[in-house]
Structure formats: structure tokens, C-alpha cells
Amino acid sequence: MGEILVGTCSWTDRALVGSGWYPPGRRDAEGRLRHYAERFPVVEVDASYYALPSERNSRLWAERTPDGFVFDVKAFSLLTGHPTREAVMPGGLPADHRDPAVLDTVWDRFRAGIEPLRQAGRLGSVLFQFPPWFRPGQRAETFLGECAERTDGWPVAVEFRHPSWWEPDRAESTCALLARYDMAAVAVDMTQTLPSSVPPVAPVTSPRLSVVRFHGRSTAWGTGSKEDRFRYGYGEDELAEWLPRVRRLAERTEQVHVLFNNCCGDAAVRAAECMTRLLDRDAPAGTTPAVPRARSAPSSTPSPGRRPTPERSSSSSRSRGGAG
């Protein structure tokens, strides 16, 4: 039975910070991460989608978390074909994902930015969340092959936002495509009432990793504001629906990451806490629960002068997760 790691998609979301979940004295950049890492063994870095990650932040994150804690890093928007603001491009480069020179530079910067996490054993996965217009076909397959070459040796997870990837007559070929590159398929929980709804399938395409992302079940997913899309509180019965799927994934992979993306107030952390309790309660009799218990992060080492704080990207105020 593989490990099941439960966490959230960001620990620096402004709504979470404002919810009161972080206690007084632990609301600075270092305190927030240490508090989070004492309660959950995994977190998704979504700020890296809005701006390229920095080596300095990655080093600090590794230093402030305990052994066994991992970060799932979301790929920069340009690397998945999403619109990207010129302001966050390195060296004044154009935000053109079709330009090979631009892509080479951005890939180099992204790779360098997450290297401290990889070296510290803290890189859980790199998440490639493709846009809704990324449909099955030869162009998409070629693109995935190029991503596989660039990420050779990394743990990679892929989330498709177009539902046709998981239609019954195509699901098998989608699994085969991801398995060819040892990429983990991301299972998705979201409302099933929209034409764009991705079905809640949970295939295994890599023996080392499976990922489940809970987006909430808001019907405003395709049209509402950010707050409307993610404003959703999971009930215990809704989370319990996923227990058999998560257990089956753990039977076939070394590690399962269960991540909550309903980042509105403290809804994500409360859902993650509830899922952890359910998984522990649901553990087969006579077995050790697969969900690792949180451990304290290593104490900080005092340094002369001002304590370093991670840099914040210029886009952090626009994202649900800052760099802190």
C-alpha cells in the first residue's frame, strides 16, 4: 500500500491568511509554512503558474519543512500554452510559447527555480495543468512528448481540462499516452453539471505517483469570478465518495497526493483535515494508516541581521498563492 499525502493547493492564499486559520505569531512567511507543514505532508505551489519560481524561495521552503514533506509545483503558464503576462517574463522576452528561443530560456529558468527542492528531496511532482482548448490529437501528443524530454527524471503529473480526454472511447489511449512518458494522470473532483466538466475517473498511469485534485463543485466553474468558482465547502459524505478510489490508487502506486483546490477562506484546509480523518478511520483493520502524520519542521537557525523572507513575485496579488 502506497502512502497517501493530503494537503491543499496553496498555503499563502489571502483568503486563508485572513480566515484566522494561522494563529497569531505565525502569520509571516516563515511562520505560515512551518504551521502548515506541521499539519499536512504535501502542498501545491500555484504561484509558480503566475511567475517563474525563484531558487531562493525554493531553498527557504526546503529549510522550513521537515523531512518527508513535499511540494507539488505547478508549471509556469507559458509552459502549458496559457496566456502569460509580459510583465512576468524574464529579461523582457515576449510571452510567445511558439518561439523556441523563448521556450528554452523559460524552461531553463523554471528548472533552476525548482532545483533546490529537487536536490533536497522535497519535489513531489511538477503539475502540468493544460487549458480547456488543449484537445486530443497529434499536436497535443507532440507537445506532451516535448514536455517529457524537458522533464526527464522529474515526477510529472498531468491534468487535462478538456473532458474529451477521458471519454469512454478515448480513455484507454489517454492512459497509454501518459504511461508512455511515466506521467501521472490527475483525477479531478468538480461539478458534473457543465459541458466542460471533467469526469471523476482515477486511472493509474505511473507506478510512482497518482494525484487527485478537488476543485469544489460550484456551478460557476466556467463563468463566475475566482471567488465564485472556488467557493465550496465539501461535506463529509462527498469526501467519503472518494475513499474507495483513493485506496485503489494507493494499492497501485508508491504515493498518492490528495489536494484541495477549493481555496476560499479556510475551506480547503478544513476539507483536507476531514479527508485525513476519513482515511485514517477507513484504514483496513490491523493495518497502519497510509496517511503520514505531520512532523515538526526543523527549527530555524538564527542569522545575524534581518531574517530573510522569500521574495514575492509581481503577480502574487493576482494569484491564489503567493511566494511566502
Image (cartoon, rainbow, N blue to C red):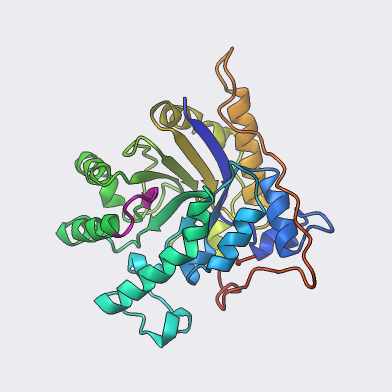
In this rendering, the answer to whether 180 lies above or below 95 is above
Residue 75, x across and y down, in percent: 42, 62
Q: Quadrant of residue 23?
A: bottom right
Task: Out of 101 and 316, give the one closest to the viewer.
Answer: 101
Identified at 51% across, 30% down, the residue is: 243
Identified at 53% across, 46% down, the residue is: 259
Q: Quadrant of residue 264?
A: bottom right
Left or right: where 103 falls relative to 5: left
Identified at 68% across, 55% down, the residue is: 33
Residue 257, x across and y down, in percent: 49, 41
Left or right: where 263 falls relative to 124: right
Point out the image quarter for the C terminus: bottom right
Residue span colored magenta? 150-158
Numbered disc total: 0
Task: Out of 159 and 48, give the one closest to the viewer.
Answer: 48
Identified at 69% across, 69% down, the residue is: 309
Residue 231, x across and y down, in percent: 59, 56
Task: Out of 66 and 74, give the one closest to the viewer.
Answer: 66
Task: Out of 126 and 159, give the one closest to the viewer.
Answer: 126
Q: Is residue 179 magenta?
A: no
In this rendering, the answer to whether 59 lies above or below 259 is below
Q: Is residue 153 magenta?
A: yes
State the residue lying farthest toward the front.
304
Residue 190, x across and y down, in percent: 46, 48
Left or right: where 95 falls relative to 313: left
